[in-house]
Structures are given as C-alpha cells and as structure tokens.
Image: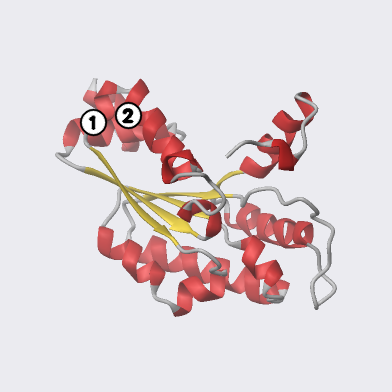
Amino acid sequence: MIQSLKPENNKQQPLIDYLHYKSLTQERVIVSLLGSNGTSGTGASKTSNSWAGRLEKSLRANRNDLETLSFINHGHEGYSTEDLIKGKKIEAVIQDDPDLIIFENSLINNHYQSLSLEQTEKDLESIMTKLQKELPNAKTLILSPNPVANGKTENSLGLNYLEYIKASEQVIKTNKWSYLNSKEEIEKKLSKKNMRLADIPD
C-alpha cells in the first residue's frame, strides 16, 4: 500500500494520494495556505465558509486516513504579490516546513493597487523560486484568485483584472507549475445555475 503511494513511483500522482502517503509515513502532515483575501476568508460569513475552511472540512470529513493533516493559514487581506514578498510572508510559510503549499495568487490586489504586469510576473517567479529552493520536497499548487463582478474594469495603468490572470497563467504554463483555475470552475457553475456572482450566499 505505502509503496504504491510513494511519490517517487508516481510522477503524476494526485495530491490527495500524496497527502495519503504522507499521513501514513509521518505523524503530522502540514498544509500551508498562502494568499490574500480569498485565503484569509474575506467576504465569507465565517472562516469555515471560506475556500480554505471548506477544503479542510471536506478533507477531514471524507478521508479518515487524513486525520494527521494540520492546516496553517497565511492569508493576508489586501495583500498583493509584492506585499507578500516585502512582508516576509514567504519566509513564514518556509518556517512551517510544509508538505503541501496551496498558493492563491493575489491578483485581485495587484490589479487594485495597479502593479504592472511585469512586476506581477516577476513577483510570481520570485515567490515560486524561493519556495522550491527552500522546500525542495514540498509540493506547491497555485490557485487562481476568485472571480470578480467586473473583470474588465481598468485600473490606473489601463489594465483589467483578466489581463493579470492571463499574464500569470502564461508564467505558470512556461514554468510547468501545478495550477488549478478555480475562477473558471466557479464561473462555469454559476453559468450552469443561471446565477450571478452576487447571488452566491456567504
């Protein structure tokens, strides 16, 4: 069982199997969450309703073999990628010595603060390079930020939110980093149910 789940034997191993393997071979499995508003739970009626809270609840409820999971939340409301770097939040994640890092890309705030696309791309590369260098055995999954009500509203640089996502996705694709486009999945579900973003309950 353990041998079949060993990451070295499974290059395309699903993260759930990776966590299962870690839980069988370690007393404590650490999942560090890094990001801004979505990760910190901004907009949710309570922390357990945020994506981070729902993920933890779902994993604990559905998988008895993941009881050793420990979640550490480094979500900082209003933080851009630049803020995460300058505020030494990457170092805080490294201190956790996690097995898995889930990084919600802080593009909503990059757009709001009018950071350039070049700066955004540079910050993303800097964050990922540091995590991979300091935590070579950890896995990292980048999450897209949440959808916004009007993704085509321009900031002071004349850039809209969707342009930040497109630029970041190009960097992610070039570097072959693990990526989950949660924004797209949320929008698909909303469209299927004929709902707007504003209709989603807390």
**How dense is the environment of label 1, judged by Cα within 10 Å: few (below 14), some, or many (20 and up)?**
some
Placement of the N terminus among the 4 image quadrants: top left
Q: Is residue 125 left or right of residue 168?
A: left
Question: Relative to 189, is 150 above or below?
Answer: below
In the rendered structure, which amino acid carries the disc numbered 1? Glu
Residue 23: where, in percent of width, then height? 23, 33
Residue in the foreground of this view, choosing between 51 and 101? 51
From the top left corner, tell me how far across and down residue 157 is, in percent: 81, 77
**Residue flagged by tag 2: what amino acid is it?**
Arg
Task: Determine the residue positioned at 67% across, 54% down.
Answer: 169
Residue bearing mark 1: 67
Question: Residue 52 is drawn in which quadrant?
Answer: top left
Label pair 2/1, CB-CB below 8 angstroms:
yes
**Mark 2 = which residue?**
60
Residue name at image x 40 percent, y 61 percent: 132
Look at 71% across and 71% down and name the residue there. Answer: 117
Q: Mark 2 or mark 1: which comes first in sequence? A: 2
Give residue 11's position: percent from left, percent from top.
43, 36
